[in-house]
Amino acid sequence: MKRLALLALLVLAGCARTPPPPIAQPRYVVGEPYQMGGVWSYPREDFQLSQTGLAAVIADQRSGRRTANGEIHDPTALVAAHRTLQMPAVVTVTNLENGLQLQVRVNDRGPVNPGRVIDLSRRAAELLGIRPGGTVQVRVEVVGEQSRGISAALPNTETPALQIAPAPVAAVEREELAPPPGAAQAARVREARRLPGDGRAGVAEQAAVSAAPERLPERLARVAAMPGRLYVEGATFSRRDMAERQAARLAGLRPVVEAQGPRGRQTFRVRLGPFNSVPEADRALEGSLRAGVSEARILVD
């Protein structure tokens, strides 16, 4: 009897269907403010972003999981996670330590560690020379044209379409006239001259032409290596006294208030460093966050 019961269980287990893999439903997302790793982030649309910092490898490399914008994570694809950029976005990541440069598609939120500017998929990190568990100095720059194309080509559930009611049209009396000579030929010329994106498809069709493919090609470039020094930077102020007030909160970390820009239009930033190693910069960042400087971040200069 026990054997029959066991056999029945085995048959049922063999008949059980494995759940189907999730279907990709990519969409354009900016998103609401959120907290991750103890720090609040405020997503925004930015097609001109250029920033430096430390890059790492995405911790959760599970293939098949759904990303923050509805795509399916593939650790062999050139994808990345960013805390504030619109998704998806195409960015150029440059390893400042060896000069290797690669375009990746931002389709998820992260890094969890507030001291990292971007998390890269396993394949993207491998191509850029980043070891698992390691960090490198990078520059991250949005590729504006491709990112704008994606923003218009994908469904956007955050911004409802603007409803415009047509203006009332009064009845107009008209008389049909015979077409002038050459009218049919002119119509054919106008049709032939119609360009991609012309007509009712408009901006969305034009954007689809320039939108980046969902899986980016592995085009690795090399530029001059430009490693820098690590700093922790707080806020930037229009008045020195406000910057000095923030610096006072970081008194135990030896902050410096630096003036930038021409006289009369100067801004003032609060900085810690430079630091000789990543652990030193991480400790300074942790101290800044504990002191209530929530906008503090690690950068390369």
Image (cartoon, rainbow, N blue to C red):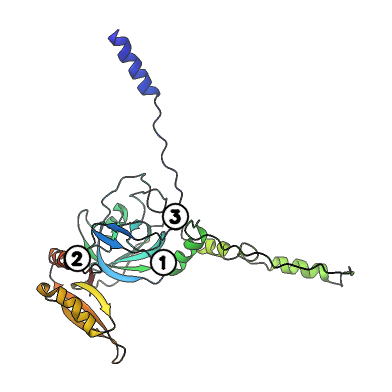
The residue under label 2 is: 289
Is disc 1 in contact with disc 3, using a CB cutoff of under 8 Å?
A: no
Residue 273 visible somewhere in the drawing: no
Q: SS of the residue at dot 3?
A: loop
Q: Nearer the viewer, residue 103 or 237?
A: 237
Label at residue 45:
1
Q: SS of the residue at dot 2?
A: helix
Alpha carbon separation for disc pair 2 and 3? 36 Å
The answer to which image quadrant residue 38 occupies is: bottom left
**Precedes in sequence: disc 1 or disc 2:** 1
**Precedes in sequence: disc 1 or disc 3:** 1
* Quadrant location of the N terminus in the rendered image: top left
Alpha carbon separation for disc pair 1 and 2? 25 Å
The answer to which image quadrant residue 243 occupies is: bottom left
Where is residue 258 shown, x and y percent of the image? 21, 83
Q: Nearer the viewer, mark 1 or mark 2?
A: 2
Label at residue 175:
none
* Quadrant location of the C terminus in the rendered image: bottom left
Alpha carbon separation for disc pair 1 and 3? 19 Å
Please state which amino acid type lies under the numbered disc 1: Glu
Label at residue 214:
3
Looking at the image, the residue that sits furthest to the left is: 252
Q: Nearer the viewer, residue 277 or 109?
A: 109
